[in-house]
């Protein structure tokens, strides 16, 4: 089996949009690397400039009483816009550039550095703009007025920077709480699936082993190997695995159950090519737990042979796993009770947590048929 982890790392580094699975916890992890987001990714430069222009207009309107004409107003507006642009845009790029350094420092230390950076940028930009206006003859130099404006402009910039830092810190803590909530929920769901898998399956397997040890030791040995692989995967803690690995786990599980059920179970797989499956992922034990529930509520309720047809497709960035089960014709299985047992809300919740809200598991029960479809989005990086 190919090394899925190395493939995932390679593709995730090649493009920020090439994530194999839209795992919501993983999406949060990028934002939680540092309490300040990537500022130039929040908005594009032209959007920042638009906000700066409107903010400059607001400040100029406030100061309009000190302006004698419309030409003075326009000069003041242009100067203010250039000054704010020179303050904000380079500082934002610099903060983004220094993120790797800032991530290793404490939040108070980073906050102080950023406030000082913004105040320094405000001081330099205002001094440059004033010098240009004086040299162009558009402004008369007044030392006292210049120093006063410089002081208030620097303090105002520092104050707004602190406000934004507090906002980013609050958002960061809220996202941290959301991430912990996701992880707690996923852990609880994993534990619940393991708990449901273990009891009846464990005792049935033990009984089968006891009967095989004397009658067929080689088959008992193979059964133990299958059990070992399945339980190792069940308790490994991995939440997302390659689709090849999930199919292998299902085959181990079905081999174990076939030892007990003899000729009552026949499974046919219709899988994509190996190269396609190499790019696919799924939440661990999702397909296995769906098959287990269907086997428990159908195969074990009859003496007839039950056929499982499993078809997997991956088209237009969506994976569809269709499981068709033919109901026994000679054994009475009440459809109403069967529909109640064919609920996969736990597995569906796990899929949604990793692949988004469009992921779902639907099961339809008719008179002689059960069709269960596992459907979830999966970006195809090869396209």
Image (cartoon, rainbow, N blue to C red):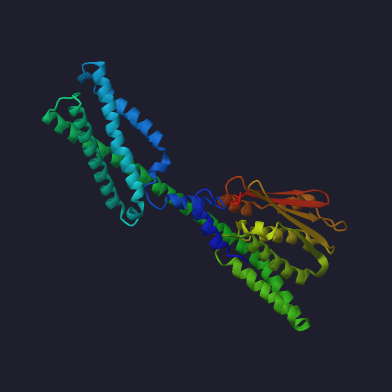
Q: Is residue 241 above or below residue 49?
A: below
Q: Residue at x 42, y 41 (%)?
A: 42
Q: Residue placed at 20% from the left, 34% from the top?
A: 152
Q: Residue furthest front?
A: 136
Residue 134 in the image: above or below residue 212: above
**Which residue occupies the foreground of this view, 320 or 146?**
146
Camera sees residue 227: yes
Q: Residue 154: x, y in percent?
A: 22, 37
Figure quadrant of residue 257: bottom right
Residue 211 coordinates in the image, percent (x, y): 76, 78
Residue toward you, 332 or 181: 181
Residue at the spot 21% in from the left edge and 19% down from the top edge: 67
Q: Nearer the viewer, residue 345 or 259?
A: 259
Instruction: Where is residue 318? Give x, y as percent.
Output: 64, 48
Q: Is residue 288 left or right of residue 90?
A: right
Q: Is residue 337 visible?
A: no
Which of these two is toward me, 263 or 201?
263
Q: Against 128, is 334 above or below? A: below
**Percent position (x, y) of residue 340?**
72, 51
Considering only vertical position in the picture, is 108 above or below 218? above
**Along the horizontal axis of the image, is 240 left or right of 36?**
right
Residue most toward the right? 330
Tell me the quadrant of the picture where the N terminus can be found: bottom right
* Residue with the most extreme bottom position: 214
């Amino acid at each position: 089996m190919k090394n899925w982890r190395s493939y995932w790392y390679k593709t995730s580094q090649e493009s920020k949009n090439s994530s194999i699975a839209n795992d919501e916890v993983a999406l949060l992890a990028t934002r939680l690397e540092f309490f300040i987001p990537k500022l130039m990714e929040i908005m594009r430069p032209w959007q920042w400039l638009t906000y700066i222009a409107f903010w400059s207009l607001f400040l100029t309107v406030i100061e309009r009483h000190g302006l004698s004409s419309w030409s003075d107003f326009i000069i003041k507006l242009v100067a203010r816009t250039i000054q704010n642009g020179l303050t904000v845009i380079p500082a934002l790029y610099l903060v983004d550039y220094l993120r790797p350094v800032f991530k290793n420092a404490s939040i108070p230390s980073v906050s102080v550095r950023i406030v000082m950076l913004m105040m320094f940028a405000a001081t330099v930009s205002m001094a440059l703009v004033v010098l240009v206006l004086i040299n162009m003859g558009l402004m008369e130099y007044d030392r006292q007025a210049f120093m006063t404006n410089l002081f208030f402009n620097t303090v105002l910039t520092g104050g707004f920077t602190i406000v934004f830092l507090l906002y980013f810190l609050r958002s960061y803590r809220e996202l941290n709480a959301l991430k912990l909530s996701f992880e707690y929920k996923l852990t609880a769901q994993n534990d619940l699936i393991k708990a449901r898998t273990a009891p009846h399956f464990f005792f049935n397997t033990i009984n089968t082993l006891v009967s095989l040890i004397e009658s067929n030791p080689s088959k008992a040995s193979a059964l133990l190997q299958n059990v070992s692989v399945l339980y190792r995967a069940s308790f490994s803690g991995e939440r997302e695995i390659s689709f090849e690995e999930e199919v292998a786990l299902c085959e181990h599980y079905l081999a174990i159950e076939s030892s007990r059920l003899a000729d009552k179970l026949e499974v046919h797989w219709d899988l994509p090519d190996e190269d396609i499956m190499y790019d696919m992922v799924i939440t661990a034990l999702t397909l296995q737990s769906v098959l287990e529930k269907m086997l428990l509520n159908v195969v074990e309720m009859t003496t007839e042979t039950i056929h499982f047809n499993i078809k997997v497709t991956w088209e237009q960035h969506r994976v569809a796993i269709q499981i068709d089960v033919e109901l026994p014709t000679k054994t009475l299985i009440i459809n109403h009770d069967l529909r109640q047992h064919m609920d996969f809300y736990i597995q569906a919740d796990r899929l949604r947590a990793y692949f988004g809200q469009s992921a779902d598991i639907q099961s339809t029960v008719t008179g002689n048929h059960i069709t269960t479809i596992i459907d979830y989005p999966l970006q195809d990086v090869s396209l």
